[in-house]
Amino acid sequence: MTATAPATAAAPPETGVRRASRAFDRHPRVGLGMLLGLPVGWLVAVYVVSLGFLLITALWQTDSFTNEVRMDWTLDNVARVVSQELYRAVTFRTLGTAVLVTLIDVAIALPVGYAMAKVFGPRARAALVIAFLMPLWASYLVKAYAWRSIFIEGGLLSSLGITPGFGEIATVVTLSYIWLPYVVMPIYAGFERVPDSLVEASSDLGARNLRTFASVVLPLMYPAIIAGAIFSFSLTLGDYIAVRIVGGSTQFLGTIIYDNVGVAGNVPMAAAVALVPIVIILLFLLAVRRTGALRNL
């Protein structure tokens, strides 16, 4: 009986998909560029281009009688925002509130995130993660109106003899609560990345818990703290809904922008005011970038 040679498998047919796959293997940067091209292009078209149109709109004028926007180039709107006392006062109030909300959220998130990552066991950690993520399942308006029912006359605080009413205090408390999950989760993730061996080594060298936290853990936490601070600071800076609900007569940059668009119909003036939080955010990011924290995010 004669042996037969084993049959060889037929080569797969050459197709355009296979040729493209081999080309991407030889040039991985081209494949990465095509993968990220659509989302990056969408980001540029929606965000960067819209900011450019915003700047252009701020240089137009609105007819005082008909409220029609005229494409007459002028710096009057920007000059009013810079020179008038009203806009300066609202800018400082908004900036101060954003800083205060950020400090409150970071002060709460640091011990909570440390306990979640280094103290509690897996079950308690999972329960706390769910507890801090659960408010995100509720609508923004539901949370804001819930705090309104607490601060309103005859609400929970009034029954306890505390009557802060609507205003800046109610705004700070409400925004601190709403943005807290956005600060807790990055800080919790940052604590999880801190090696336990560093904490144990510091303890073995005689450092107490506070010294270990300040000298070993906290320097490693700067990127996570900055990430959470960017969320709370920027979101507070542009908020206007919660201010309307619990702020009473308090004016923020967001409410002025809303009033100029929805009430006065002065879109160029609203665009000029909108440039203020944009500039503040850019300055904040530049200041953070100089610390080197953004490179480690």
Image (cartoon, grey):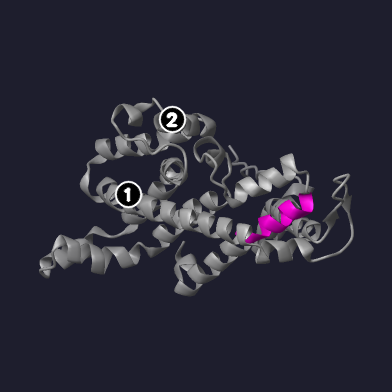
Q: Residue at x 53, y 32 (%)?
A: 141
Residue 274 among those drawn in magenta = yes
CA gap between label 2 and label 1 equals 25 Å
Q: Residue at x 56, y 68 (%)?
A: 283
Q: Residue at x 68, y 51 (%)?
A: 39
| Relative image position of residue 205 (x, y in whole percent) | 12, 70
Q: Residue at x 38, y 48 (%)?
A: 184
| Relative image position of residue 233 (x, y in whole percent) | 49, 55
Amino acid tagged 2: Ile
Highlighted range, magenta: 267-277
Report which residue position mark 2 lands on: 152
Report which residue position mark 1 lands on: 108
- Image quarter for residue 176? top left
The overriding secondary structure of the stretch rendered in magenta is helix
Left or right? Give the position of 256 relative to 117.
Answer: right
Q: Tell whether label 1 touches label 2 (CB within 8 Å).
A: no
Considering only vertical position in the picture, is 28 above or below 119?
A: below
- Quadrant in which the N terminus appears: top right
Label 1 crowd (10 A; few <14 / some 14-19 / many >=20): some
Of 234 and 136, which appears nearest the observer? 234
Of 226 and 255, which appears nearest the observer? 255
Of 6 and 273, which appears nearest the observer? 273
Q: Nearer the viewer, mark 2 or mark 1?
A: 2
Amino acid tagged 1: Ile
Report helix, strand or loop for mark 2. Answer: loop
